[in-house]
């Protein structure tokens, strides 16, 4: 009797395994994205009515990628995905580690696509540098905010479309067609940025905050000053930094100070207080480092954020 039971158990296990394999074969292609921007690009290229591909936004929380804590679910998603789209920088080293055991995954590394045009985190005059001098390491740190350039987005969308077309050949024409249409929209907005900046009276922005916008500023030759480089975790600016930014604001007759993602307004307020401008206003740009399903449901898209950012730049440079 015992032997028979054992055989039955074995048979059931085999059936489960075989049917399990079949289910996996029939399952949708799974794309994992670590950033809101990549998730939105992929959704546009896949198309609204396409149910053959399942797209997951990994870092779907209010924590930005620099302080993100991976969950067990994230590790499972990475070990099962067919396509991974990630920035490939320092903050996402855990992603590289987690996907290493997944042999079937096609990996799209955005910094790698940029190659030699990937930018090193920029330190400009007046920025707080405490973090770097104290850490002591001399490693090259790339600026990971690669999605904040419409020109980069065009490169990335082409790569995403080609990868989807190869993974799902029966829909390849759809992906290439959708990408073509979307890239047209990206290029139109890129032209609008260029003409807006060209026609602006001013040429310099002052960020009383962190500075994740180096790709965007460089695309149109906008000059800038900022309190901290990249996405420094520092929240306290020295009085020296505040005074430096206030003096620049006066020198350039600036009427608007910028912050990032609605944060750090205390520094901006301190800078404003130290200028001679009694009507200084503070505006906030969105760097798309946080944002998840809730914002997506409310209609937030990569293009809608980049349009709002252009409105702010236009106001600040006027
Ligand atoms: Zn950042």
Image (cartoon, rainbow, N blue to C red):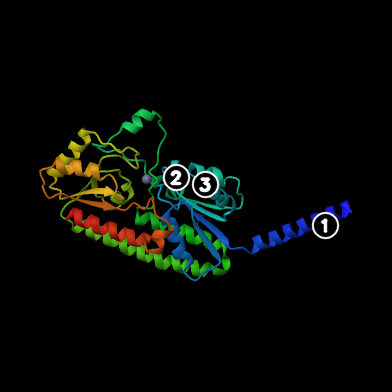
Mark 3 to mark 2: distance in Å? Answer: 9 Å
Neighbours of disc 3 within 10 Å: few (<14), some (14-19), many (20+): few
N-terminal of the pair, mark 1 or mark 3, is 1
Estimate the x, y position of residue 201 in percent, counting from the top left.
Answer: 15, 55
**Of the pair 42 and 234, the residue shown nearer to us:** 234
Residue occupied by mark 3: 71
Disc assigned to residue 68? 2
Mark 1 to mark 3: distance in Å? Answer: 37 Å
Residues at marks 3 and 2 touching, judged by CB atoms closer than 8 Å: no
Numbered label tally: 3
Q: Element type at marker 2? A: loop
**Of the pair 178 and 95, the residue shown nearer to us:** 95
Left or right: residue 45 versus residue 193 is: right
Residue drawn at x 23%, y 47% as measured from the top left: 223
72 lies above or below 184: above
The response on whether ligand 1 sits within 8 Å of label 3 is no
Residue occupied by mark 1: 8
Mark 1 to mark 2: distance in Å? Answer: 46 Å
Q: Residue furthest bottom?
A: 49
Neighbours of disc 2 within 10 Å: few (<14), some (14-19), many (20+): some
Dividing the picture into quadrants, the one containing residue 181 is: bottom left
Estimate the x, y position of residue 203 in percent, counting from the top left.
Answer: 19, 50
Q: Considering the image in quadrants, where does the C terminus appear?
A: bottom left
266 lies above or below 196: above
Left or right: residue 93 versus residue 288 is: right
**Of the pair 195 and 304, the residue shown nearer to us:** 304
Q: Quadrant of ligand 1?
A: top left
């Amino acid at each position: 009797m015992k032997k028979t039971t054992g055989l039955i158990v074995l048979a059931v296990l085999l059936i489960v395994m075989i049917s399990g394999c079949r289910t996996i074969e029939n399952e949708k292609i799974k794309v994992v994205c670590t950033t809101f921007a990549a998730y939105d690009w992929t959704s546009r290229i896949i198309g609204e009515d396409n149910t053959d591909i399942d797209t997951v936004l990994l870092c779907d929380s209010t924590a930005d990628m620099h302080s993100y804590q991976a969950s067990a679910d994230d590790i499972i998603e990475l070990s099962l995905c067919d396509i991974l789209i990630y920035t490939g920088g320092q903050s996402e080293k855990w992603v590289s580690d987690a996907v290493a055991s997944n042999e079937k995954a096609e990996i799209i590394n955005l910094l790698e696509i940029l190659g030699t045009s990937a930018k090193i985190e920029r330190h400009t005059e007046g920025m707080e540098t405490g973090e770097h001098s104290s850490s002591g390491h001399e490693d090259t740190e790339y600026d990971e905010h690669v999605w904040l350039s419409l020109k980069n987005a065009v490169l990335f969308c082409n790569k995403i479309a080609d990868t989807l077309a190869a993974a799902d050949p029966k829909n390849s024409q759809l992906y290439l067609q959708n990408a073509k249409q979307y890239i047209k929209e990206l290029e139109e907005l890129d032209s609008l940025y260029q003409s807006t900046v060209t026609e602006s009276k001013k040429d310099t922005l002052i960020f009383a905050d962190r500075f994740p916008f180096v790709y965007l500023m460089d695309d149109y030759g906008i000059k800038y000053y900022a309190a901290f480089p990249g996405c420094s975790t520092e929240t306290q600016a020295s009085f020296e930094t505040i005074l430096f930014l206030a003096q620049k604001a006066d020198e350039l007759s600036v009427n608007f100070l910028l912050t990032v993602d609605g944060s750090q307004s205390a520094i901006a307020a301190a800078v404003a207080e130290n200028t001679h401008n009694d009507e200084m206003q503070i505006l906030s740009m969105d760097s798309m480092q946080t944002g998840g399903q809730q914002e997506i449901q409310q209609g937030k898209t990569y293009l809608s954020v980049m349009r709002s950012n252009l409105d702010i730049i236009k106001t600040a440079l006027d």
